[in-house]
Every structure is written in C-alpha cells, then in structure tokens.
C-alpha cells in the first residue's frame, strides 16, 4: 500500500487515504504512537494517551489498534512472549530481536510488498496477505566478547 510519509501529510489524510473514516479515537491513537516513535507496548501507548488527555478505554484502544493495523497504518510485531509491540510505520518492514537484551531493530523488506514469502500451506483455501519475519540472534553489543 502506498502510504504517504509522516510530517508531509496530516493524520486525517493518512487515515482517509487508507480507506478509513476519520474518528477522534483513530486520530488520537495514531498520533500518540507516531510521536512516541519506535516499538511500543499497549501499556506505553495507554499512558501516552492519558498524558495527552485522551480518555479512551483499553477495549477501544485495542479496537482502534486492530483497525489501524488491518489497514496498514500501524504495524503489530510479536517480539517474544508477552511482547506485542505497535508502531506507526511508514513502510512495511521486518524486525530483528536480540535474544539477550531484547533490543528491536527494523529490517527493510527486500521484496517491498506483502506477502514477501511464499507459504507452503497444507492445502487450498488459504489466503495469505502478510508474512512478517522476526530475525533472532545477538545485537552488536551482545555479540561482543566480554
Ligand atoms: Zn542485545
Ligand atoms: Zn519496526
């Protein structure tokens, strides 16, 4: 999907160009995530929203996160046990997660469009629209001999 870069285009336009109706919760969640930057847990996002004076229930925040990620405005990355992380992503990408310190690094997608892998599924009837790769290993800090 061709999502314009942040800064140039307003949140309203970004939400609209993803084919979504613009609502205050959607604007609030996207803007909070975008200004936080990086990969954030739902808890971090909730407290950022509270600081901004947004009174959204946990259920409605999760509902907005689901809709925004379905439409490619944000990315959900499963970085390990109990670590569902969200980010306002301008480009579809993958992630490297350090096994030792848990640091997350963005990895550009070599293919550039979804799904970037062929799935060897056990039969017909599956529709694959996304493949997100998590690379695991050691980051430069942790791979240094001490
Ligand atoms: Zn590390
Ligand atoms: Zn990322």
Image (cartoon, rainbow, N blue to C red):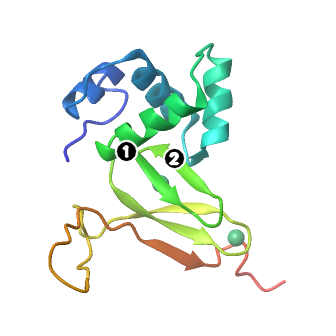
Question: Residue drawn 29% across and 63% down?
Answer: 130
Q: Residues within 10 Å of mark 2 (few under 14, many from 20)?
A: many
Question: Residue drawn 73% across and 76% down?
Answer: 142
Across and down, in percent, residue 116 comes to 25, 70
Q: Quadrant of residue 37?
A: top right
Relative to 43, residue 13 above or below: above
Q: Which mark is residue 54?
A: none
In-image side of 38 versus 15 (left or right): right
Q: CA distance from mark 2 to mark 1?
A: 9 Å
Across and down, in percent, residue 65 comes to 45, 38
The front one of 118 and 31 is 118
Q: How many marks?
A: 2
Question: Residue drawn 36% across and 38% down?
Answer: 67
Residue receiving disc 1 = 69
Quadrant of the frame with the C terminus: bottom right
Across and down, in percent, residue 71 comes to 28, 42
Q: Residues within 10 Å of mark 1 (few under 14, many from 20)?
A: some
Across and down, in percent, residue 53 comes to 63, 13
Q: Are marks 2 and 1 in contact (CB under 8 Å)?
A: yes
In-image side of 59 versus 123 (left or right): right
In-image side of 21 versus 135 (left or right): left
Residue receiving disc 2 = 86
């Amino acid at each position: 999907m061709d999502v314009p870069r942040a800064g140039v285009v307003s949140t309203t336009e970004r939400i609209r160009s993803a084919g979504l109706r613009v609502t205050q919760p959607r604007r609030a969640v996207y803007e909070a995530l975008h200004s936080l930057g990086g990969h954030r847990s739902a808890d971090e996002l909730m407290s950022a929203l509270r600081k901004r004076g947004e009174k959204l229930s946990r259920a409605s925040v999760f509902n907005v996160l689901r809709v925004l990620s379905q439409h490619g405005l944000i990315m959900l990355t499963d970085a390990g046990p109990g670590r569902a992380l969200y980010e306002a992503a301008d480009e579809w990408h993958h992630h490297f997660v350090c096994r030792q310190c848990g640091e997350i690094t963005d990895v550009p997608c070599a293919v550039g469009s979804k799904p970037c892998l062929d799935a060897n599924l056990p039969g017909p009837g599956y529709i694959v629209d996304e493949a997100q790769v998590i690379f695991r290993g050691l980051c430069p800090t942790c791979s240094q001999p001490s």
